[in-house]
Image: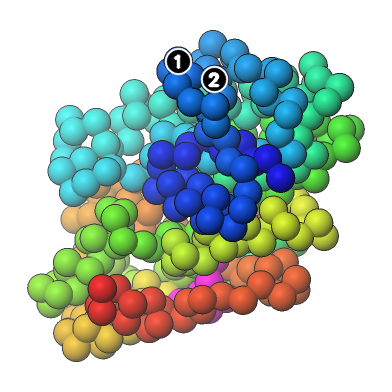
């Protein structure tokens, strides 16, 4: 099977490409520069250009490309760093997704031959803050009003409604709060825990629907191979917990304390209120109902398991 992947150099993309190649898939990487290898396909979302001949040879597309929501390092949270959600950053986040989605829709509608599987990255932030309400893929009420919710709905998912008439199995992978070696969230959580600086962020009663990067990669492959899966799919641990409980359990594994509270107003000043809400304070108590129904096996279903894996690296 020939798989085309956008965002193949990103946090998820690099690992997913490696996994699929190891498992015998022929992987093609979408690139914005001149093509330098046989397994590369040119595309330019901003110019709405793509190598349509190579596109038509693919069996499936996994669309991951998009400007990172979070800064790449701790310095990105500083004012004027370019990592905070200022007007320019938000524009890059939105259009990097919208242009990509629009280009694929345009290419599908102009083609008689096309990949029959299309898996797009999205985000659990599409639901909006739901407090302690349990959310599944059947939840259709979106609490709108935030930037990250708008991006997930309008830039990632809505454009795909334009190819519903095509014979394409569309999967919308709603990624939760991803933990894994090498991303800024995991680095910050591990560092503050080791320094005995972890604790409730704000009140700490907001739900964090997290997932390990290993389970994310396995879930993408699972959705690729399972023809019964389509539509929205929640990529989250089956055990959502509050942020306070997350910190307590994480610290216990590291044999540290989790007592130092961080006032929400201070975090808002540090990160900017929109970014802080999107990454920390949005409460999402999500269950991966479709993955569980189809028999997906989580490598790290509870946070203690993953904290131990990070501790023992």
Q: Describe the colour scheme in one phrase.
A: rainbow
The reply to whether callout 2 and callout 1 are in contact (CB within 8 Å) is: yes
Q: Position of residue 56 (x, y in %)?
A: 74, 25
Q: Which residues are magenta?
A: 232-241
Which image quadrant for residue 285? bottom right
* In the depicted structure, whether residue 217 falls above or below residue 272: below
Q: Position of residue 79 (x, y in %)?
A: 17, 35
Q: Position of residue 183 (x, y in %)?
A: 31, 54
**Pick the front one: 128 or 177:** 177
Q: Residue at x 63, y 17 (%)?
A: 51
Q: CA distance from mark 2 to mark 1?
A: 7 Å
Is residue 282 at all visible to an observer of this figure? yes
Q: Residue at x 51, y 47 (%)?
A: 17
Which part of the image, by quadrant, shows the N terminus?
A: top right
* In the depicted structure, whether residue 297 falls above or below residue 128: below
Crowding near the residue tagged with mark 2, few <14, some 14–19, many ≥20 C-alpha atoms within 10 Å: some
Residue that numbered label 1 is attached to = 34
* In the depicted structure, whether residue 57 falls above or below residue 191: above
Q: Residue at x 72, y 66 (%)?
A: 290
Which image quadrant for residue 121? top right
Which image quadrant for residue 3? top right
Q: Residue at x 26, y 87 (%)?
A: 252
Looking at the rendered structure, which numbered label has been put on residue 42? 2
Magenta span contains residue 262? no
Count of number-bearing discs: 2
**Pick the front one: 209 or 275:** 209
């Amino acid at each position: 099977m020939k798989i085309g992947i956008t965002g193949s150099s990103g946090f998820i993309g690099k690992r997913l490409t490696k996994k699929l190649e190891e498992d015998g898939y022929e992987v093609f990487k979408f690139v914005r520069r001149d093509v330098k290898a046989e397994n590369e396909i040119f595309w330019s979302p901003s110019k709405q250009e793509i190598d349509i001949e190579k596109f038509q040879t693919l069996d499936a597309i996994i669309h991951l490309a998009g400007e990172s929501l979070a800064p790449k390092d701790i310095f990105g949270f500083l004012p004027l760093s370019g990592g905070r959600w200022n007007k320019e950053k938000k524009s890059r986040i939105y259009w990097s997704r919208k242009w990509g989605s629009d280009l694929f829709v345009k290419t599908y509608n102009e083609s008689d031959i096309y990949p029959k599987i299309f898996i797009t990255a999205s985000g659990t932030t599409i639901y909006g803050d739901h407090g302690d309400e349990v959310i599944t893929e059947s939840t259709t009420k979106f609490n709108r009003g935030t930037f990250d919710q708008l991006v997930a709905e309008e830039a990632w998912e809505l454009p795909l409604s334009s190819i519903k008439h095509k014979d394409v199995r569309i999967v919308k992978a709603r990624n939760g709060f991803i933990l894994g070696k090498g991303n800024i969230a995991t680095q910050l959580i591990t560092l503050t825990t080791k320094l005995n600086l972890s604790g409730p962020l704000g009140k700490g009663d907001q739900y964090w629907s997290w997932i390990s990067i290993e389970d994310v990669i396995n879930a993408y492959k699972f959705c690729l191979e399972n023809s019964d899966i389509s539509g929205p799919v929640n990529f989250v641990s089956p055990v959502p917990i509050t942020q306070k409980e997350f910190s307590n359990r994480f610290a216990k594994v590291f044999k540290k304390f989790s007592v130092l509270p961080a006032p929400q107003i201070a975090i808002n000043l540090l990160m900017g209120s929109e970014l802080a809400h999107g990454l920390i304070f949005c409460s999402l108590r999500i269950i991966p109902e479709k993955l569980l129904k189809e028999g997906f096996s989580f490598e790290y279903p509870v946070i203690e398991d993953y904290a131990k894996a990070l501790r023992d690296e």
